[in-house]
Amino acid sequence: MADKAWKQFERRVAHFFNGQRNPLSGGNSGNGTRADVIHETLYIEAKQRVKHSVVTLWDDTKQKAVKENKTPVVCLSEKNRPGFWIVIHSDDLLKL
């Protein structure tokens, strides 16, 4: 039986970060982490959906960035929370 798409995605993410997919992630794996990917220093959660709203924003930003020959980056902030989140495509992260 073929792997479910979300399991394949978790494996791709694990490979990208030089980690290992956590089977039975959620505490039943016995690996000491509930993360989707077993990694020495990162806690990696991998979520595959039909659509993420932030990706729609990123797509729009990419179209504009390409016209200027630049790398698209989206930064997100929540009011009254320090710091911010950085969204960058995995292919672009490797270029940096």
Image (cartoon, helix red, strand yellow):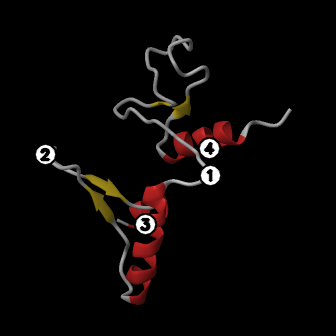
Q: Residue furthest right?
A: 1
Q: CA distance from mark 2 to mark 3?
A: 23 Å
Q: Around disc 3, counting alpha carbons within 10 Å, would you say few (fewer than 14), some (14 to 19), or many (20 or more)?
A: some
Q: Quadrant of the N terminus?
A: top right
Position of 85 compared to 1: left or right?
A: left
Q: Earlier in the sequence, mark 1 or mark 2?
A: 1
Say which residue appears at 40% left-offset and 82% top-offset: 64
On screen, residue 80 above or below 7 = below
Label 1 secondary element: loop
The three-letter amino acid code for the residue at tag 3 is Trp
Q: Earlier in the sequence, mark 3 or mark 1?
A: 1
Camera-nearest label, 2 or 3: 2
Say which residue appears at 43% left-offset and 58% top-offset: 54
**Circle 2 is placed at which residue position?**
80
Q: Around disc 4, counting alpha carbons within 10 Å, would you say few (fewer than 14), some (14 to 19), or many (20 or more)?
A: some
**Circle 1 is placed at which residue position?**
50
**Circle 4 is placed at which residue position?**
9
